[in-house]
Image: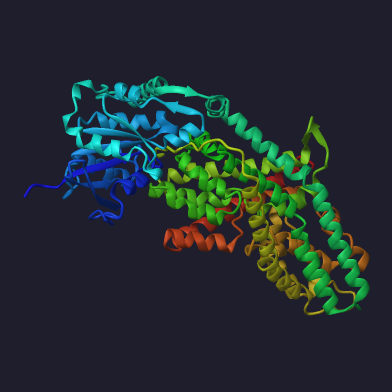
């Protein structure tokens, strides 16, 4: 009995292999795992024009025959005939994305150099034409020396021609092929660029504009300054644009407190509503405009196609600390929240690389820190300009975000040379097409994130604030005695203050840090509740948080508090997710120890330096 002939679909990720596999095999598919590994094996039955059946294998996406992941290792072994129990493919069908032809041809040359019967499927030509790029498949075929068939897999265009070329593949003349054996990666890249240029029949201004944008935005010297300038603009906007809306919210909450005080008699219930609910939770809700503006920029970067290019730009910088651009997306996600950032590390193949990314993700300045930063900056940093369109408050906020990034990079460098020792792994990714961010998608994304923030304010922050109010309000103080001194929370704060006073923290800060373990932004509501309970009369209570901070804190204390929050891992949910992703408590406990240690040291250094400078 003769062996059933086999063909393998191989190419870069996102080339449309799965759609082509479905078009060629229909429902005649079997899915299992390759023996000994968790990589999925997809195989199906197709028929050549002669009626001969062929087993078609859809191999995992790969960028090179030099594997950087288990998926790529399986692809290499199957293509080269080294995988136990898997026959050597009789025909290789190399699938390339017409819109990303230059990048995909680098791997295609490697496969063609193996000397096997090969057919190239120039897939998704409709998407390329939509973007103004028309390619000549015959010119590309002459350059490569193998048949090139234009296809649109999702519409089954070109499928018959592709099947016919697969049937004739064994008759190919190997001497006509493009010579790539022994070529280095840079040489294959240069050849891919030249072949792509030779295959272009026409391109409109839109496609040329995209190419020109990439030349600037991905330039090794121009790209990083553009990225950091954009980030600088974002943090300027967070303060400058949000101020009117934040002031309006603050005024509304103050007015609501006044209405409650005027409508209800003095007592525990009124104090619960004004000091616990409205003052505590309201002090966090007023920062909703800053959160919305920050996420608006992040969503615009994602949906325009720039975010992937930012990851590419950061790859070179991150390689110096033992990471790759693959870690950039999880770390960038951590600017929103460290929880999805840590979960996104699942895409990182190298286990040491992934562990390091998990351990440094809490150092990225998440949106929960923004209310803390905003209230302290508003209280102690003058709202002055230091240059055309450059506000000092926005500049300080930008500096805090940069401090978090630098801290994460230094921590990664140390971790990659100690507990997570290893070198940087390779990084290749698809560049999405540029596009205007869809307004509807932007609106939905902003609403979802605003709702998450408000839901946290109504659940975690509310519960933590009310619990603190109860601890601050009972037992009741004797006449002439401070309510804080008499309360349960006050006694707890006295114990914490012994540890934290050397780094400049006062008793109110010592008290606020404890409930802030539930969520970082609780620190703001905790301070607001503490000062509301501590207020000697209604006039003091009505002052608001910022005037009370200005009256009771020194500038060195405020700067130390900011430094603490750059490093402190104050979020129980983040620790829980880290435990789940690392399958144990070893690394989450390590994370807690090193981050709290760094927070204490740098808060102390900031306080002592500020005092020495006479600030």
Q: Position of residue 564 (x, y in %)?
A: 66, 52
Looking at the image, residue 386 sits to the left or right of residue 86; the answer is right
Q: Quadrant of the C terminus?
A: top right
State the residue at coordinates (47%, 32%).
Answer: 129
State the residue at coordinates (54%, 50%).
Answer: 361
Q: Position of residue 522 (x, y in %)?
A: 69, 62
Residue 6, picture quadrant: top left
Q: Position of residue 239 (x, y in %)?
A: 76, 44
Residue 262, picture quadrant: bottom right
| Image vertical order of residue 202 relative to residue 25, above or below | above
Looking at the image, residue 588 sits to the left or right of residue 269; the answer is left
Nearer to me, 261 or 102 = 102
Can residue 593 be seen at all in this image of the molecule?
no
Nearer to me, 445 or 320 = 445
Nearer to me, 302 or 92 = 92
* Residue farthest along the left direction in this orientation: 1
| Image vertical order of residue 264 relative to residue 508, above or below | below
Can residue 434 be seen at all in this image of the molecule?
yes
| Count of all numbered marks drawn on residues in the image | 0
Model colouring: rainbow
Q: Position of residue 594 (x, y in %)?
A: 53, 53
Looking at the image, residue 493 sits to the left or right of residue 64; the answer is right
State the residue at coordinates (17%, 33%).
Answer: 170
Looking at the image, residue 505 sits to the left or right of residue 81; the answer is right
């Amino acid at each position: 009995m003769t062996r059933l002939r086999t063909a393998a679909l191989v190419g870069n990720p996102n080339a449309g292999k799965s759609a082509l596999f479905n078009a060629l095999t229909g429902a005649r598919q079997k899915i299992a795992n390759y023996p000994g590994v968790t990589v999925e094996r997809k195989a199906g039955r197709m028929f050549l024009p002669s009626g001969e059946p062929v087993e078609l294998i859809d191999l995992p996406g790969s960028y090179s025959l030099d594997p950087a992941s288990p998926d790529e290792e399986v692809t290499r072994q199957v293509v080269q005939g080294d995988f136990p129990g898997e026959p050597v493919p009789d025909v290789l069908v190399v699938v390339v994305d017409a819109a990303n032809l230059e990048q995909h041809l680098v791997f295609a040359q490697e496969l063609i150099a193996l000397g096997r019967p090969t057919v190239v499927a120039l897939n998704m030509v409709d998407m390329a034409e939509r973007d103004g790029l028309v390619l000549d498949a015959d010119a590309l075929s002459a350059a490569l020396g193998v048949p090139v068939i234009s296809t649109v897999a999702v519409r089954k265009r070109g499928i018959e021609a592709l099947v016919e070329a697969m049937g004739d593949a064994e008759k190919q003349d190997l001497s006509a092929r493009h010579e790539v054996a022994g070529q280095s990666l840079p040489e294959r890249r240069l050849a891919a660029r030249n072949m792509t240029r030779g295959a272009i029949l026409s391109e409109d201004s839109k496609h040329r504009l995209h190419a020109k944008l990439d030349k600037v935005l991905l330039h090794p010297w121009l790209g990083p300054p553009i990225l950091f300038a954009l980030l600088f603009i974002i943090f300027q906007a967070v303060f400058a644009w949000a101020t009117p809306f934040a002031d309006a919210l603050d005024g509304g909450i103050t007015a609501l407190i006044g209405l409650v005080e005027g409508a209800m008699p003095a007592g525990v219930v009124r104090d619960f509503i004004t000091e616990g609910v409205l003052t505590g939770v309201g002090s966090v809700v007023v920062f909703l405009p800053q959160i919305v503006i920050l996420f608006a920029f992040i969503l615009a970067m994602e949906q325009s196609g720039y975010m992937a290019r930012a990851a590419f730009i950061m790859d070179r910088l991150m390689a110096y600390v033992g990471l790759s651009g693959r870690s950039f997306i999880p770390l960038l996600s951590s600017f929103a929240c460290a929880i999805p950032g840590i979960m996104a590390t699942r895409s990182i193949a190298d286990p040491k690389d992934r562990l390091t990314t998990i351990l440094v993700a809490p150092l990225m300045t998440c949106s929960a820190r923004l209310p803390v930063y905003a209230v302290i900056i508003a209280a102690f940093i003058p709202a002055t300009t230091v240059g055309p369109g450059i506000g000092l408050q926005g500049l300080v906020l930008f500096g805090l975000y940069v401090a978090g990034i630098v801290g994460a990079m230094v921590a990664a460098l140390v971790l990659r040379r100690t507990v997570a020792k290893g070198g940087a792994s390779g990084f290749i990714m698809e560049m999405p097409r540029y596009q205007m961010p869809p307004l509807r998608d932007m609106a939905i994304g902003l609403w979802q994130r605003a709702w998450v923030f408000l839901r946290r304010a109504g659940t975690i922050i509310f519960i933590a604030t009310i619990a603190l109010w109860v601890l601050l309000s009972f037992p009741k103080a004797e006449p002439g005695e401070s309510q804080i001194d008499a309360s349960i929370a006050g006694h707890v704060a006295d114990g914490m203050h012994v540890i934290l006073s050397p780094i400049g923290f006062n008793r109110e800060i010592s008290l606020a840090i404890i409930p802030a373990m539930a969520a970082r932004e609780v620190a703001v509501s905790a301070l607001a509740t503490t000062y509301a309970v501590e207020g000697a009369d209604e006039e003091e209570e009505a002052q608001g948080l910022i005037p009370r901070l200005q009256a009771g804190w020194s500038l060195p204390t405020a700067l130390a508090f900011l430094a603490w929050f750059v490093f402190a891992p104050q979020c129980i949910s983040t620790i829980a997710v880290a435990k789940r992703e690392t399958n144990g408590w070893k690394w989450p406990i390590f994370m807690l120890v090193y981050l709290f240690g760094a927070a204490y040291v740098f808060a102390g250094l900031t306080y002592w330096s500020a005092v020495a400078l006479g600030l």
